[in-house]
Image (cartoon, rainbow, N blue to C red):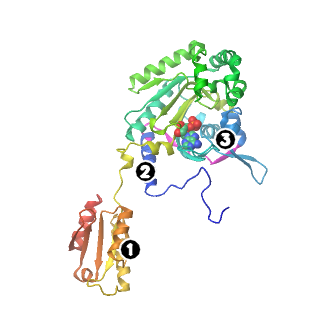
Amino acid sequence: MSARPQSVKGTRDLLPPEVEVWARVEETARRVFALYGFGEIRTPIFEETELFARAVGAATDLVGKEMYSFTDKGGRSLTLRPESTAPVCRAYVEHGMHSLPQPVRLFYIGPHFRYERPQRGRYRQFHQIGVEMLGGKPGESDAEVLAVLVRFLRELGFTDLKVLLNTVGDSASRQAYKSKLVDYLRPHAERLSEDSRRRLETNPLRILDTKSREERELLAGAPRLEESLTPASRERFAWVRARLSDLGIPYEIEPRLVRGLDYYTNVVFEIVSEKLGAQDAICGGGAYEGLVEELGGPPTYGVGFAIGEDRLVEVLPESSPARARRPGPVVIRAMVRGGGAVHGGLDVDAADLAEELRSADIPAVSVGAADPKKAHAAADAFDSPVVVIVGSDELQAGTLTLRDTRQRREETMSKPDALARLKALYGR
Ligand code: AMP
C-alpha cells in the first residue's frame, strides 16, 4: 500500500450530491416494481464458487476469467457475486418458493463484482438493479418483465429507448445451430481471434456478438440462428413480439444478440445507449428454463433482467426527475450586530434553532458564529435556498433574518412568520 491509501483499481467512492441521484433511481425502481407486484430480495454478497460455475457456465468469460474468488479460513471456495440470477434461483429453491403461488416476482438492487479491465462504464465493483420472475408462463412472463423494465426507464425520463430483442431458441435449436456455425467457421479459424478460436470449442454462440470488424465480416456469411429454430421456439418468439406490440413496447430484432451467460434460452434482450460508446449496454436479460432445476428445484420457467446502475446514472437524461435536486438545508449563522466579538452562547442559539427547524421537518445546519463568507460558502456547497441569521438583536426582538441566496436579499421578520415562510419553502 502506498503512503496514502487509495480506492482499489476499478472501484470508486460515490459522493454527495451524486448519491442523491442514485437514491432517486432506486426509489423509482422500488415504486415501479411494486406496481407490478415484485418484492425485494437481498441475497448475500458472496456465495459458494460452485453456484456460479454451475449456473452461469464454466466456459463463460464471467466464470473463467472475471470472478473474485477466494478461499476462506474454513477452506471453502467463495466468490463475490458477479451477477444475481444464480443467487436468486438458489434462494428460490432453498426457501421452497416453488410452493408459493406462482409466479414469484423478485427484484434486487446492489453491488456486484467482476475482475474486468476498468474503463468508462466498466468497474470491478458495479451496481445492478434487476428483476427475476420465476414459475410463470413462457411468453407472458417475458412480456411482463419487459413491460416493467420499459415503465421503469420511462419514469426515469428516457424517451428514445431501444429494446434489442432476439431468440437463442431452446436447447435443441441451439444444438442444431452450434454445429452449423462451427462447420462454417472452422475452415476460417485463422481469421478468428485467439478468444474466438477458444470459443469455437467451448461456447461458439458467443462469437456472434464479437466487436471485431474482421470477425463481423466473416459472420455476415454464416448460417443464421433463426433458420435452426424449432417450431416451438419460433412460435414462442412470434407470440412475444406480438404481445410487445400490443403493449406499445418498441423493440428491434438484433440477430447477433446472444448474451454471455449459458443459462439463457429463447428470448434474450438488451437495452443500449449510444451515449456510452463501446460499453453501450445498460441492461441485459432473457429467459432461462433449466436453471432452477440445475440448482435442485423443479422445472421452472424464469425470466429476468439486470440493469447496470452505474451506466444508467451516467446516461440519465438531463431532464430526468431523478436529477431534480432537492433544496439543501437552511444554513443558520450566528452574529452580533455591530461586529463585536461573538458571544459564545450564540453558537448554541444557532444550534438550538437548527434543532427547532428539524422538529418542524425543515432540514437545517448550523455554521455557528461564522462570518458571512463562510456561511455563504456553506450555502453554496449545500445548494441552500436560504441562510437564517440569528443575532443578539434578533434574539432580543424575537425576530429572525432570512437571506434569500438566489435573490441575495435579506428580510427580518417575526420568528413565527419566518417559520411559516420556511415551511412553505420546503413544502411542509
Ligand atoms: P450482465 O449480467 O453481464 O448481463 O450485465 C447486465 C448489465 O450490468 C450490463 O448491461 C451493464 O450495464 C452492467 N454491467 C455488467 N458488467 C459491468 C461492469 N463491469 N461495470 C459496470 N456495469 C456492468
* Residue occupied by mark 1: 367
- Between 237 and 270, the residue placed more toward the observer is 270
Contact? badges 3 and 2 (CB < 8 Å): no
Q: Check disc 2 and give the amino acid type.
A: Val
User: Mark 2 — residue?
Assistant: 21
Q: CB at mark 2 closer than 8 A to ligand 1? A: no
**In the image, which residues are magenta?**
34-48
Q: Secondary structure at mark 2?
A: helix
Residue type, mark 3 in image = Glu
Can residue 233 be seen here? The reply is yes
Question: Where residue 39 sits: x, y (%)?
Answer: 50, 42
| Residues packed near mark 1 inside 10 Å, few (<14), some (14 to 19) or many (20 plus) | some
Q: Tell me which residue sits at (53%, 28%) in the image.
A: 136
Q: Are marks 1 and 2 in contact (CB under 8 Å)?
A: no
Residue 421: image quadrant is bottom left
For residue 390, the mark is: none
44 within the magenta span: yes
Assess whether residue 40 is covered by the magenta stretch. Answer: yes
Q: Which residue is mark 3?
A: 66
